[in-house]
Image (cartoon, rainbow, N blue to C red):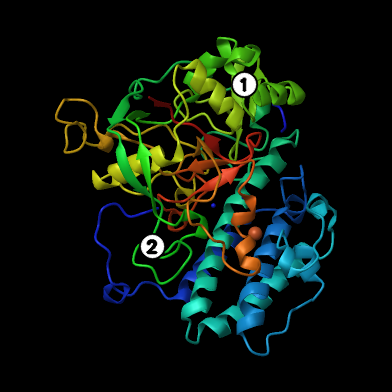
Amino acid sequence: MSLPASPVAPPEAPPQDPSSLPPGPSLLDRYREVRGFTLELTRGLAPEDQVVQSMEDVSPTKWHLAHTSWFWEVFVLEPHLEGYQALDPEYHFLFNSYYVQAGERHCRAQRGWLSRPTVAQVLDYRAHVDRGMNELLAGPTEGDLRELVELGLNHEQQHQELILTDLKHVFGVNPLRPAFRPGSPGPAGHAAHLAAPAAPAAPGPGPRLAPLGFVTFDGGVHEIGLPHAGRLPSPEASFSYDNEGPVHRRFIEPFALADRLVTNAEYLAFLDDGGYRRPELWMSAGWAARLAHGWTEPFYWEERDSQWWSFTLGGMRPLHPDEPVVHLTWYEADAYARWAGARLPREDEWEMAARAALAAGVPLDGNLADAGRFHPAPAPPHADPGGAGARTGAGTPGPATLRQLFGDCWEWTSSDYAAYPGYRPAPGAVGEYNGKFMTGQYVLRGGSCATSRSHLRITYRNFFPPDAAWQFTGLRLARD
Ligand SMILES: [Fe+2]
């Protein structure tokens, strides 16, 4: 094993007047649900688990618990709840992440130095913020306040995903390879790596997994992005980040998109064919990164006694051939695609295909955090191989055959993370949320097994630098 920051347009449905929609859970109910899920993720963790910063990109769980509370305090409670008093004004310095307009902040690389406040004190801070939010959300919440609360909920959900991926890294660099959730997604235990696997995984696709297929799409002008992105109320989505808009037109050439993610077995064939020894398959910067970091296999893979194992949130497990390959850098995903005679999809192609899939009946759902598996799963069989949308008139696979679009792992695209035409970040510190990161990163689409269903849309644009591998990142092939 070698060691090395996110928004869906409803398909073709006509806009609905929000006032005609049935009432959903109240903001207060949703606040309690989201905050509760954050704490649920820390169930069973010892305080020692929650203070480790295993690399600069990783933040301790305790920091995530505090920073999400800081976000509510600074952006919602202090400007909107009369009489609110911060529990400790020094927390403003400690738990600001990157909001320059919100004041000075503690160094990111030194979050693991903070033995104080203790985990118990941070939980007291969360309870203090929750009391303020309960008082605030008992009153009217319209306009700017509602937008801020929606932003705070989605911000906390992003940090839930980071809690999972950061904990995976913390446990993954521990020689004991502890399990975050023993038993999920499969046989594992505190020291499972010490025992021989009962049934070592054999390379090659399993019998249930159909060969990779491609769905073809005609070219043309297509609308990409979400109207009213970042603004509420919106008839299109209960929430969106500002970077998902404005909606704009793109001319897309004809292309084909794979009907599922690339699997471990397929990636192993790249490895066995010398993929990590052939610079011609790699971007120059990618090859330099491979050499500099000593990458010889995907992050979290380990070879033991001629068998490949991978570290999961359930502990060490024999590599499952049919599960999607995950924890790839952009460089690795790009090199694999080239080796496979294909390429990474562009984000507009991915979004166009996802809209077509939704219109053909594919649900915006999948192996997401709600399922509690916290690891990618093999592609399910085609639910309705002969059904409407599964085949086009010419007998070729249609968009209904696209699987794993949502959940399992974020899909690297070949698209630079850049502003859509007409994009303007929001004024003030919250405008720093997305816009200032639009350089040197690639867009990922589709969510992962650590993303909550209520956090995901087809227009959601996640973004990471090309050498990042600690998120649940994989790939789907595309062809011209
Ligand atoms: Fe944050």
- Taking the view exactly as shown, the residue that stands out farthest to the left is 393
Per the image, label 1 sits on a secondary structure element best described as loop
Circles 1 and 2 in contact, beta carbons < 8 Å? no
Q: Which residue is mark 1?
A: 196
The three-letter amino acid code for the residue at tag 1 is: Ala
Mark 1 Cα-neighbour bin, 10 Å: few <14, some 14–19, many ≥20: few
The three-letter amino acid code for the residue at tag 2 is: Ala
- Residue at point 63%, 50% (across, down): 437
Residue 242 or residue 468, whichever sits in front: 242
Answer above or below: position of 223 versus 390.
below
Where residue 454 sits in the image (x, y, percent)?
A: 44, 58
Where residue 361 sits in the image (x, y, percent)?
A: 24, 45
Answer above or below: position of 166 versus 247.
above
Quarter of the image holding residue 366? top left
Total labels: the figure holds 2
Mark 2 Cα-neighbour bin, 10 Å: few <14, some 14–19, many ≥20: many
- Residue at point 83%, 52% (across, down): 110
- Residue at point 40%, 49% (across, down): 458
Report, in whole angstroms, how far the alpha carbon at label 1 lies from the one at label 2.
Answer: 49 Å
Image quarter where the C terminus lies is top left
Quarter of the image holding residue 327? top right
- Viewer can see residue 318: no
Q: Is residue 414 left or right of residue 233?
A: right
Q: Which residue is mark 2?
A: 237
Quarter of the image holding residue 37? bottom right
Residue 374 or residue 455, whichever sits in front: 455
Eye-nearest disc, 1 or 2: 2
- Viewer can see residue 32: yes
Residue 19 or residue 50, whichever sits in front: 19
Where residue 402 sits in the image (x, y, percent)?
A: 32, 35
